[in-house]
Image (cartoon, grey):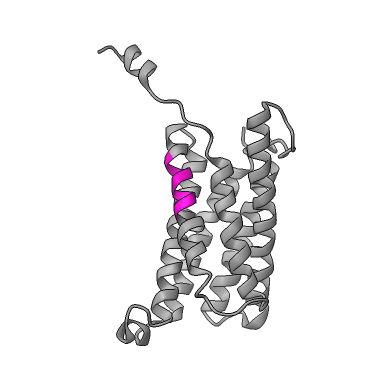
Amino acid sequence: MSVDSIQKTQVVVADPSALGLFGLAMVTLVASSQKLGITTGFSFVIPWAIFLGSIAQMMACVYDFKHNNVFGATVFGAYGLFWSAVAACWLIKMGALGPVLAGAADVKQLGFAFVGYLIFSIFGTIAAVETNKVLLAIMILIDVLFAGLALDALGLGEHWAHTMAAWAELFIALLGFYGSGANLLNKFFGKTFLPMGKPLGIFK
């Protein structure tokens, strides 16, 4: 079979950005409600972390790879795996995986994980400059979120770091819903139904 024949038989898949952003929006909305003290506990945050924060974003990651969209694939994949890890940490903290793991938990290790994600997110923010303004704003807020989470977990930021992270997460959710809806409607109607904002054009 020739290369041309193989390319013609490849299945075309839809842009998964709307699904990925919806997953991000849902999990950050629910998680921010806990951080802001509107809700309590993690029991009903965990399912949204696993199914929306993780699985939905991982699905978007896989299909963005098929689109050769290195930004979407890498970012959705990294944050999808993040929410799986966070859900596992919550389960450990709550004793669901046994008292030995719960008793050995050191929250500062989570702080270092947040630092690692902050570093990754800064690179993602630089890339987002050449995507659109909604994604750029989301990435900047994610930087603020991870900075606040890292300071809080490492015991360096007192209560203000936790509060900063909580509000950043809420605004990530709101922008995520807008971005998801814009991607869905713009692709469905084949025109700009909701604007996302042009790239800044600094690096390209």
Q: Which residues are magenta?
A: 55-62
Which quadrant of the figure has residue 101? bottom left
For this rendering, which residue is in front, 185 or 176?
A: 185
Count of labels shown? 0
Q: Is residue 9 above or below residue 59?
A: above
| Image spot of residue 180 (x, y percent) | 63, 45
Q: Quadrant of the N terminus?
A: top left
Q: Name the residue: 60% across, 60% down.
A: 143
| Image spot of residue 145 (x, y percent) | 61, 65
58 magenta-colored: yes
| Image spot of residue 84 (x, y percent) | 42, 62
Q: Name the residue: 56% across, 65% down.
A: 146
For this rendering, which residue is in front, 35 or 165?
A: 35
188 magenta-colored: no
Q: Tell me which secondary structure the magenta stretch mostly adopts.
A: helix
Work out whether residue 16 can be spotted. Answer: yes
Q: Is residue 167 above or below residue 193?
A: below
Which quadrant of the figure has residue 91? bottom left
Q: Is residue 112 left or right of residue 1?
A: right
Q: Name the residue: 41% across, 25% down.
A: 11
